Image (tube, rainbow, N blue to C red):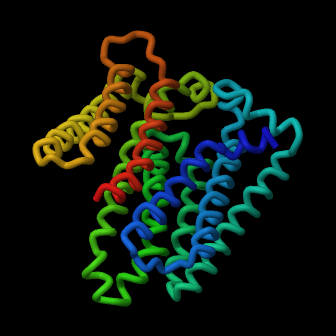
């Protein structure tokens, strides 16, 4: 069981579950929004999401076996117990299950086109594992896009049907859409930075496996500087936004300050001129920033 939890990146799955519940409980129910999905159906949506994610992680390990043997040897233990064919079939079954559940939910809310969300997610994950992960930047952008797509998918299934069917609901709760979109952008941006840092950390194993990730095509220092600049823009934005909230005496400003502080911590780790950079620590702080952002969703709803 411990081995499978590691393969399925249980911490990432837990963060995703927390994110989905934060929106359902901290936004929809906190504001009294008439969600399109019953709570039971919402749980199925959560199950579909994490099942597809688990399949993506497993498929990634199958195609990443060569580089993981160098970068993360603990992930190779799964191949001592199961063949690649068995693991590939498990990934297919998990993907099919996630798509079927997503399709069933789309049928339930009478939005068949929404089946495209789980289908597109699965296709992108498989293309990433097979091809895009080995190429510069596109793999990073795809994973960042999928991080934001988790939020957009929930918006489509649980919010948009109610807004589109009732003009009064749309007039009263239309602002909820912006909350979802802002966090989707937050997820995309922070994930993109984290993926760039991850590629730097994995540069030696990726080079041995013949990958052409951005740090290999460019160089480690250049990609680190790119990540630094992206994060600097992020920190300046939230610093300025926090300052504005202080001026308006908005009670949420101390929580926004936390986002700024965490981003500054990563900036310090990645600072130009530092020779020995702890990229794993930078990744973990960014993951903590994402978790903190999830925590802010219900907090803002309670204070607003």
Residue positioned most to the right? 81
Q: Nearer the viewer, residue 165 or 25?
A: 25
Residue under the point 74% across and 29% down: 74
Locate the N terminus and report the quarter of the image it occupies. Answer: top right
Residue under the point 81% across and 39% down: 78
Up-down relation of residue 72 to residue 162 (above or below): above
Residue under the point 47% across and 53% down: 147
Image spot of residue 227 (x, y percent): 35, 31
Image spot of residue 258 (x, y percent): 33, 36
Snapshot quadrant of residue 269: top left
Locate the C terminus and report the quarter of the image it occupies. Answer: bottom left
Residue positioned most to the left? 247
Image spot of residue 7 (x, y percent): 72, 42
Up-down relation of residue 107 to residue 72 (above or below): below
Q: Nearer the viewer, residue 46 or 232?
A: 46
Up-down relation of residue 166 to residue 98 (above or below): below
Image spot of residue 97 (x, y percent): 71, 68
Snapshot quadrant of residue 298: bottom left
Snapshot quadrant of residue 124: bottom right
Q: Is residue 62 left or right of residue 80?
A: left
Q: Nearer the viewer, residue 98 or 295?
A: 295
Residue under the point 27% across and 47% down: 252
| Total numbered labels placed on residues in the image | 0
Up-down relation of residue 130 to residue 277 (above or below): below
Q: Is residue 156 left or right of residue 132?
A: left
């Amino acid at each position: 069981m411990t081995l499978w939890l590691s393969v399925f990146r249980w911490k990432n799955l837990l963060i995703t579950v927390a994110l989905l519940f934060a929106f359902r409980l901290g936004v929809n129910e906190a504001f009294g929004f008439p969600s399109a999905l019953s709570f039971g159906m919402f749980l199925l949506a959560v199950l579909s999401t994490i099942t597809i994610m688990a399949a993506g992680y497993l498929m990634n390990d199958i195609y990443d076996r060569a580089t993981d043997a160098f970068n993360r040897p603990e992930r190779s233990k799964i191949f001592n117990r199961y063949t690649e064919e068995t693991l590939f079939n498990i990934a297919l079954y998990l993907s099919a299950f996630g798509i079927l559940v997503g399709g069933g939910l789309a049928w339930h809310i009478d939005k068949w086109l929404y089946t495209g969300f789980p289908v597109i997610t699965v296709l992108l994950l498989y293309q990433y594992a097979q091809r895009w992960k080995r190429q510069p930047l596109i793999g990073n952008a795809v994973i960042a896009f999928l991080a934001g797509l988790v939020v957009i998918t929930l918006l489509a299934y649980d919010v948009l049907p109610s807004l589109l069917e009732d003009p009064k609901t749309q007039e009263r709760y239309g602002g909820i859409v912006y909350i979802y979109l802002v966090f989707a952008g937050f997820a995309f941006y922070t994930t993109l930075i984290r993926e760039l840092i991850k590629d730097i950390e994995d540069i030696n194993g990726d080079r041995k496996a013949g990958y052409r990730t951005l740090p290999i095509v460019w160089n480690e220092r250049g990609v680190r500087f790119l990540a630094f600049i992206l994060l600097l823009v992020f920190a300046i934005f939230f610093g300025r936004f926090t300052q504005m909230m202080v001026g308006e005496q908005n009670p949420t400003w101390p929580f926004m300050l936390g986002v700024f502080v965490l981003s500054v911590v990563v900036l310090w780790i990645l600072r130009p001129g530092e020779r020995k950079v702890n990229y794993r620590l930078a990744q973990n702080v960014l993951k903590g920033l994402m978790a903190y952002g999830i925590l802010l969703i219900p907090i803002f709803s309670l204070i607003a």
